Amino acid sequence: MATAQRDVSPGLRAARMTRRALLRTLAVGLVALTVSNVAQAQYPDRPIKLILPFPGGEGEAVARLIAPSLGQHLGQPVVVESKPGAAGNIAAGFVSRAPADGYTLLMGFSTIFEINPLLYRNLGFDPAQLAPVSLVAETQFVLVVNPSVPARTVQELIAYAKANPGKLNFASAGVGSPLHLAGELFQSRAGVKFLHVPYKGGGEAASAVLGGHADVLFGTISTSMANVQAGRLRALGVTGERRFAAYPDLPTIAESGVPGYNVTAWHSLALPAGTPPAIVARINEAIVRTLAEPDVRQGLERAGVIPGATTPAEVSRRIDTESKLWKSVIERAGITPE
């Protein structure tokens, strides 16, 4: 007996094909999700790279102090790798283009997120491609003068500058550097005018003031205070909102007669945008534990920075707030993008 063939309409046949395709898509998605979840659960299973934008300076000291303990808390070595150049943009671009799998971290500095986008027409990367993880440490600067400058306090410096317009110059690590912008903000808030002399790096700027070729410097605490203690420079105040613990007798600039003056820079960890939240949280937890270790904290403090972890959201809010401040300072000082 012949078997009757069922007449299946084209519409029903298409519907069945659509359902099969949907089921295949769901199956593939579930497999991918399972693989992703397994990978995150096993993270990390190989060494992690910590990319350093500024070798040889404070950033390298911070990176090498935290890397061993961070690796211990993550269960894999954290290897510091330098990629210098373009004011940190080369390192930031490298990390932004890396796979978003948690194996490439940026040892970021605040200028990369807040100042570089305002000063460079072509960064070589999109800052939105970097996802903050946590602050690691904050650093203040210190206002120092050559001993020939007749000022022993911030107020005396302001008074002398107002009585002698155009006589004092201040050295910086280059146009748009944190040391330059700290000086520009000071002039604006204090109502004085210095002649800005940019140098190729903080070392050259400090040498200029030490040699009497420049009068004023907003310098790093670790380098400047060694010269202050040796009598080669005179310190007038620190730039943060609180006194620096290692030098409690040195007042802040704000309490010395420039209300609201507060300039700090910071080091942070960042990942490529799109890194799974579970991995971001894992690294954040590890840096919190790392910075809680007494040996790590003491090492960072000796390096002239203040250790402290935050949430990713707190880093993002800080970038937004401080970017607005530096934008106004740059515009007021007439600094143009390169």
Image (cartoon, rainbow, N blue to C red):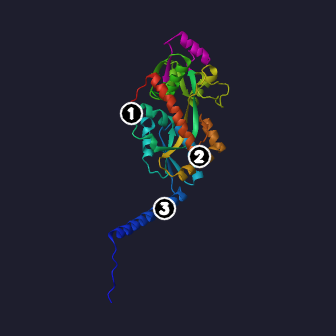
Residue at the farthest bottom position: 1
Quarter of the image for the C terminus: give it.
Answer: top left
Determine whether 15 is above or below 295 in the image.
below
Q: Which mark is residue 9?
A: none
Q: Is residue 118 left or right of residue 185?
A: left
Q: Is residue 154 magenta?
A: yes
Q: Amino acid at mark 2?
A: Ile
Q: Amino acid at mark 1?
A: Arg
Q: Which mark is residue 35?
A: 3
Q: Amino acid at mark 3?
A: Val
**Residue range of the region highlighted in magenta in the rendering:** 145-171
Give the alpha-carbon distance from disc 1 to disc 2, as whole Å: 33 Å
Which quarter of the picture shows residue 308?
Answer: top right
Q: Nearer the viewer, residue 212 or 106?
A: 106
Q: Which mark is residue 287?
A: 2
Q: Earlier in the sequence, mark 1 or mark 2?
A: 1
